[in-house]
Image: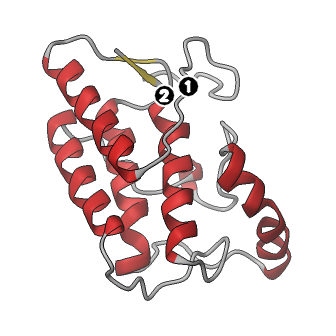
């Protein structure tokens, strides 16, 4: 993939997920589109990278985050933005300061494998399993807020895929 400016890239699709079930259905649609060679990516990542990234970020609260906690001032500011993000979505083109490539967990794997991993991660998110690790950006979150944040995160990245 090239290095398109993802804040303004053409072909971005607005996605709105209102539930875990809608999230799963979207992953299945993307998988079917990939199988039939109808899937297109308009950003810098492949479908496998996008879904791997989403699966990893769902898993981090259960297994531990690979990045350090953000500085107090950053966490404090982000806590004020959390409600808006949970309602309205996440902005495109944001990079985590001090992290090579701006984020983590975007392994370039086959789309079908990434979709399978993502569906397993979504099921885990939907379960009652306790998540022992707090967000390095937002701190402690309720289960409902973690679900909403993951839905908004998925909307952000799945918008770069069209079928």
Q: How crowded is mark 1: few (under 14 residues within 10 Å), some or many (20 or more)?
A: few
Q: Tell me the SS state at disc 1.
A: loop
Residue occupying image coordinates x 50% and y 24%: 43
Side (left or right) of 114 relative to 52 = left
Side (left or right) of 15 relative to 84 = left
Q: Tell me the SS state at disc 2.
A: loop
Between marks 2 and 1 in the image, the one whose residue lies nearer the viewer: 2
The quadrant in which residue 140 appears is bottom right
User: Residue 62 appears at what percent x and percent y?
Assistant: 36, 79
Residue behind mark 2: 44
Residue occupying image coordinates x 33% and y 79%: 128
Q: What is the quadrant of the N terminus in the image?
A: top left
The quadrant in which residue 132 appears is bottom left
User: Residue 162 appears at what percent x and percent y?
Assistant: 40, 18
Q: Distance between the residues labelled 2 and 1?
A: 6 Å
Q: Residues within 10 Å of mark 2 (few under 14, many from 20)?
A: some
User: Residue 13 appears at what percent x and percent y?
Assistant: 53, 21
Q: Classify 4 as above or below 133.
A: above
Q: Which numbered marker is on residue 3?
A: 1
User: Residue 5 appears at what percent x and percent y?
Assistant: 65, 25
**Do the residues under discs 2 and 1 have CB atoms within 8 angstroms?**
yes
Side (left or right) of 105 relative to 75 = left
Residue occupying image coordinates x 39% and y 40%: 50
Q: Which numbered marker is on residue 82?
A: none
């Amino acid at each position: 993939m090239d290095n398109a400016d993802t804040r303004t890239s053409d072909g971005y699709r607005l996605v709105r997920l209102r539930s875990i079930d809608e999230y799963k259905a979207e992953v299945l649609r993307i998988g079917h589109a990939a199988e039939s060679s109808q899937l297109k990516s308009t950003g810098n990542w492949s479908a496998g990278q996008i879904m791997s990234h989403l699966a990893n970020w769902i898993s981090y609260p259960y297994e531990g985050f690979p990045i350090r906690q953000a500085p107090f001032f950053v966490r404090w500011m982000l806590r004020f933005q959390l409600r808006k993000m949970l309602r309205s979505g996440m902005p495109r083109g944001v990079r985590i300061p001090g992290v090579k490539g701006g984020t983590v967990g975007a392994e370039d794997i086959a789309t079908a494998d990434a979709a399978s991993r993502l569906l397993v991660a979504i099921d885990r998110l939907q379960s009652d399993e306790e998540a022992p690790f707090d967000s390095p950006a937002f701190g402690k979150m309720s289960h409902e807020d973690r679900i909403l944040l993951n839905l908004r995160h998925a909307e952000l990245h799945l918008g770069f895929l069209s079928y």
